[in-house]
Image: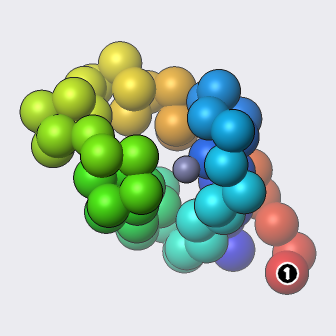
Amino acid sequence: MLKFKCSSVGFDCNFVAKGKSEEEILTQCAAHATKDHNMKPEEITPELQDKIKKNIHKSLF
Ligand SMILES: [Zn+2]
């Protein structure tokens, strides 16, 4: 299981994405960012995705 905390890329937010792959996490983050942070899909840049990928951690839970 992989885990990503929204707060690790600088948002004051307690959202945590969980998934089996980086793609799953990125999909959840994109949905979360557009819904809860009022971001436009085009604002989710490759740079931001890269930042997210660097902050994805393996979790046992
Ligand atoms: Zn968030």
Foreground of the two, 32 or 60: 32
Q: Residue furthest right?
A: 60
Q: Which residue is mark 1?
A: 61
In the foreground, 28 or 61:
28
At which x and y percent is residue 15? 64, 61
- Location of residue 26 (image quadrant): bottom left
Q: Identify the residue shown where x is 41% and y is 57%.
A: 36
Q: Is residue 44 visible?
A: yes
**Residue 59, image quadrant:** bottom right
Question: Can see residue 56?
Answer: no
Q: Residue 19's spot in the image, x, y percent? A: 55, 73
Q: Residue furthest top?
A: 47
| Quadrant occupied by the C terminus | bottom right
Q: Secondary structure at mark 1?
A: loop
Looking at the image, which residue sits at the far bottom?
61
Q: Can you give x and y, in whole percent of width and height, for residue 14 in the image?
A: 72, 57
The vertical placement of 38 against 14, above or below, is above
Seen at 54% across and 74% down, the residue is 20
Vertically, is 25 above or below 1?
above
Residue at horizontal 40 percent and vertical 46 percent from the top = 37
